[in-house]
Image (tube, coloured by chain):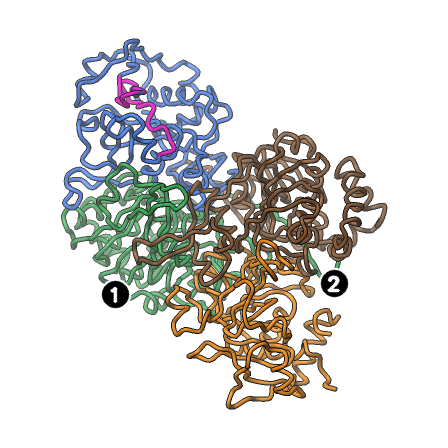
Chain colours: A blue, B orange, C green, D brown
Amino acid sequence: MADYTPSEMMIVCSARALAGERVVFVGVGLPNIACNLARRTVAPDLELVYESGVFGARPARLPLSIGDPTLVSGATSVCPMSDLFMNYLQGGRIEVAFLGAAQIDRFGNLNTTVIGDYRRPKVRLPGSGGACEIAIHAQKVFIITRLKKRAFVERLEFITSAGHLTGRPNQRKSLGMPGSGPQRVVTDKAVFRFDADSGEMFLSSIHPGVTVAQVQAEVSWPLKIAADLQTTPPPSPEELRLIRAELDPTGMYTT
Amino acid sequence: MADYTPSEMMIVCSARALAGERVVFVGVGLPNIACNLARRTVAPDLELVYESGVFGARPARLPLSIGDPTLVSGATSVCPMSDLFMNYLQGGRIEVAFLGAAQIDRFGNLNTTVIGDYRRPKVRLPGSGGACEIAIHAQKVFIITRLKKRAFVERLEFITSAGHLTGRPNQRKSLGMPGSGPQRVVTDKAVFRFDADSGEMFLSSIHPGVTVAQVQAEVSWPLKIAADLQTTPPPSPEELRLIRAELDPTGMYTT
Amino acid sequence: MKITAMRNAVTRYVHDGDTVAIEGFTAFIGFAAAHEIIRQGRQNLTLCRMTPDLIYDQMIAAGCARKLIFSYLGNPGVGSLHCIRRAIEKNIPRPLEIEEYSHFGMVGRYTAGAARLPFFPLKSYLGVDINRANPRIQFVTSPYSDENIAVVPPLNPDVAVIHAQRADANGNTQLWGLLGVQKEAAFAAEHVIVVVEEIVDEAVIRSDPNRTVIPHVVVDAVVHQPFGAHPSYVQGYYDRDNKFYQEWDKISRDAGQTQAWLDEWVFGVDDWTGYLQKLETREPEIRTRLAPGQALSRPVNYGLYGREGA
Amino acid sequence: MKITAMRNAVTRYVHDGDTVAIEGFTAFIGFAAAHEIIRQGRQNLTLCRMTPDLIYDQMIAAGCARKLIFSYLGNPGVGSLHCIRRAIEKNIPRPLEIEEYSHFGMVGRYTAGAARLPFFPLKSYLGVDINRANPRIQFVTSPYSDENIAVVPPLNPDVAVIHAQRADANGNTQLWGLLGVQKEAAFAAEHVIVVVEEIVDEAVIRSDPNRTVIPHVVVDAVVHQPFGAHPSYVQGYYDRDNKFYQEWDKISRDAGQTQAWLDEWVFGVDDWTGYLQKLETREPEIRTRLAPGQALSRPVNYGLYGREGA
């Protein structure tokens, strides 16, 4: 048995991916902890921007939602939603953003809207929130989600947020999307990246103790695998200490 | 000799025209004094809105410009320019606005941009500022200007702000202008109004001691005259007391 | 003087069939107003809100709405909005029409509504199905670049309800914390009900005019309703009652339990005072549990400018 | 740490041929920055400002500009901007290209620039000659109503200079009083120089995050320059020096006198400290004359939210 949880592995992978980044758009839960871990390790200058309009938050407790009042008190700035979407996100100020999804396809397109027919849904999901625009405007997108066959699907039932679309070269650019789209998918079993030419997801790094077959079993399409497939380095003792002692002491998100 | 100045007469005429109004867009100088006089007489609920974004000002001195800091301190609200133009003016919240002009034509169109050719001007004037939009969006426009032949012209050299255009019925509406356009022109010799059908300016009220011929002499086109031409009631002792003792005690604008 | 009781404000400004926006992103959510609307039995409302949250889950469970205009359906930090899902997935208690945008799309709709613009442009809805599901999202071509850009139409509610920390009796309203789209919603609406924790003297408002988010010019009614955003929060006044958000997740999974909750907590009381009494009977220390510590802003000097012609 | 001297900030971020916006509507006008730009001999600038005011009158008289983008040319409360008129009417000291809007048009240009929109729509330029004089003003058709609505293109200056009351060393900048279009200009610009009356500890900024108009993310340099907006004013710090505005009306009517003034007050000093010394030598009581009284904002409570899972 590993001495860390799958959630902790996801947090650590996400944090490491933020090395050197400066402005990240963050949701609560795992991405929040990952960004805070990155600030204390690989990205000391990282600025966390919350979708609720908060910058430079100094939360006195682990926030319960992106609108938690603890994010506001002691922040460096708080702005209305129109400023957030117009001047920060559309204005090109966001370098990295995290997105989750109920369904993802091989090009990193995401569905958070509906399972089944839109007008007669089997399961009604939350919808876009800011995700549709984040996927267009953030310079890079990191996706965090658990690896499950019903999530990694051949064909989305609804496209809420654009990834690399159908994989045609320059397709995002020709549609007028400033951001470069999804760069990584961090899961509890492996990390995926995207081929620069085809836009297709490939297995880039596999977590310790997981086999390629176990990963393929949870992905609905024949998965491409990196020639130099890595084994994800496990969380370091210092990373685990920061998560457990400082960032999520009650284990709300990490157990 | 009248015991009041032409400026005082203009202020009083403007103030009286504000009877019952609630939200007025005001510049400094005569309109500012007129609006404050109206608040103390015929329009106690009048809210003064300054183009600089100030509402409910309580100036401790007579403001020197629409951006005077004395307007800000103690106001009920101060907003950015984008709010002022989008939500207040274009949003249809302004009932009355005052405009001045270097030139005015018989339909109340105004020029504050240039005398001579635009690219090779004889006299370069200030330009629009907010006037172009005020003329479109304010529910009513009152014009304050001194009566002079070179100002009341047959044909403007440049249209900065739209009045009743060429006088065709529904012309403003068909262009998409929400406001009803100029309603009065207050001058130092007379007050003019506009014919509801033709949009043409007519002499509505003449100040005490002024003749129709004197007015016509300062207007470049053959002036229409109201069938029931009035003599403007002179400033009352109370109006004069308010102006002289409270609103402009140093006589900066009124002498 | 616009101060009035919630009952009167709702009776006067919220009518069957109206388009209603109760805004406030995660914070300042006007539950007191929502409960009064439910209690007065309003029907066929079109409810607008970026994040319908528990407030519209309750109103939709109570059968007030025929349509929902929104951008994110969730119980923040907890999970699903089960009543709204039940309405969309199973037509319980009645069918619910939906008109769906992204957050930015909703911001754009309110912005256009406030500014009386025929549309608001935003770079969004590229390569996705949202605009296919919602034909009100259109595209226009820029005369400068031939770029096609999405546009959304104005949203002009019949009434907006805005909860805030404080207002004066005339309706000048100050907010701090998350500002969401409250200003835009208020300017876009035909009528505005402001609900506040405190009615303050005009001098308090005038000491900091830049803090006034909603000016009296657009306000029709001011309702003094302390704790009126419970179980959501008001910055500096009380915390979110997260226990209730979690409890609702359980209650709302079942239509019967939901109805029982509405019967007890909404229909079973006369007004918000009754709701608060019940709340404090159940948990006498609730206000202490939700009370934040003090973190005061440093004052700024606006300056007195009294001298003539400095 | 972005604190730097004005000289360095101008050397680094303002280059010949740049598009420069020094914004601030009537208040917060960045004269210290303008004088340094003149002193360093910048040429061929495109100057953007809703109200060019004395600041651009001086820069244009000094020959810094080849083009002016604006919406109102006036010496507020006093009269004309004679130097700019001389440039437009008589090509003195050199021809000046103009690109002219209404106020709302300039607001729209900055707003589109800040938000990277291809255009900003506004209901204006109906029945007038402004759009005939400026072909950059175009019209688009609304897909909802077939209404034609004016649009203006984005304005993205190479550099914006914003004067404010206070910032922290990292560039988080707070302003109160007239807010003009400073926020939009800062977000629209490639580089931003913030000039402040006071550098404050980050804790002051953090005590009131809603007051932060310009966040550090968009700021390149912070210059500490008290009294740096003289002869304009900074709310709560000093009043407008109206005597100078009137004096300028006389000086600026004559090209020779204007040049003599620039020689003495701009070229004749090393920096803003030198300017202020000259000012106080001429009028020892100037700071007293322009000092406002105190009018403090009432503090608001943001609340301390430290407890887990309230």
Q: Is residue A23 left or right of residue B231?
A: left
Q: Where is residue A54? Give x, y as percent.
A: 46, 39
Is residue C47 part of the magenta span, yes or no?
A: no
Q: Nearer the viewer, residue C244 or C302?
A: C302
Disc 2: which residue: C308
Q: Secondary structure at mark 2?
A: loop
| Chain of the residue that carries numbered disc 1 in the rendered image | C
Q: Nearer the viewer, residue C148 or A97?
A: C148
Residue at the disc numbered 1? C16
Q: Is residue D236 visible?
A: no
The answer to whether B200 is drawn above or below residue C61 in the figure is: below
- Queried whether the magenta region covers residue A200, the answer comes back as yes
Q: Which residues are magenta?
A: A177-202
Whether marks 2 and 1 lie on the same chain: yes
When asked about the image quadrant of residue A241, the answer is top left
What percent of the width, then of the height, locates residue D197?
A: 68, 42
